[in-house]
Amino acid sequence: MQAKLQEQLSPADAEVILRGLPERIKVALIARAAEIEDPIAISIANFLDTEALGFVDCKPGRGQ
């Protein structure tokens, strides 16, 4: 079975990623999601690229 490339992160996948992160980073991402009033997936993309509106336009390191 071939994996399907996705441009979005599902809420379930975002939760899996959060569980694998150190507590302080997890807390920061959840706080950022609340601050920007968007799902955790958008918060993760925004953490990687402060100018990203989601994973479609995410370029890690841009805007930092």
Image (cartoon, rainbow, N blue to C red):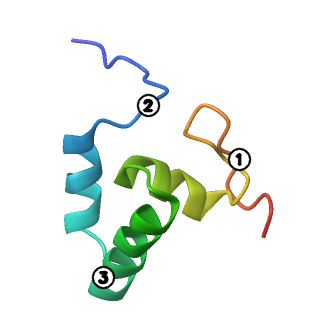
| Residue at 27% from the left image edge and 84% from the top image edge | 23
Q: Where in the figure is residue 57, as x and y percent of width and height? A: 67, 36
Disc 2 residue type (three-letter) = Gln
The numbered dot on residue 19 is: none
Q: Are marks 1 and 3 in contact (CB under 8 Å)?
A: no
Residues at marks 1 and 3, CA–CA distance in whole angstroms: 23 Å
Which of the two discs, 1 and 3, labels the residue nearer the N terminus? 3
Instruction: Determine whether 3 is above or below 49 in the image.
Output: above
Q: Where in the figure is residue 29, as x and y percent of width and height? A: 41, 70
Disc 1 residue type (three-letter) = Lys
Which of the two discs, 2 and 1, labels the residue nearer the N terminus? 2
Q: Residues within 10 Å of mark 1 (few under 14, many from 20)?
A: some
Instruction: Determine whether 20 is above or below 38 in the image.
Output: below
Disc 3 residue type (three-letter) = Pro
The residue most toward the right is 63
Q: Where in the figure is residue 19, as x and y percent of width and height? A: 19, 66
Residues at marks 2 and 1, CA–CA distance in whole angstroms: 14 Å
The numbered dot on residue 59 is: 1
In this view, the residue in front, 62 or 5, is 62
Quarter holding the C terminus?
Answer: bottom right
Q: Secondary structure at mark 3?
A: loop
Which-is-in-front pick, marks 3 and 2? 2
- Tag 3 residue: 22
The residue most toward the bottom is 24
- Tag 2 residue: 8
| Residue at 29% from the left image edge and 50% from the top image edge | 14
Q: Where in the figure is residue 53, as x and y percent of width and height? A: 62, 42
Q: Are marks 2 and 1 in contact (CB under 8 Å)?
A: no
| Residue at 42% from the left image edge and 62% from the top image edge | 33
In screen coordinates, is 29 left or right of 18? right
Residues at marks 3 and 2, CA–CA distance in whole angstroms: 23 Å
Q: Quadrant of residue 58?
A: top right
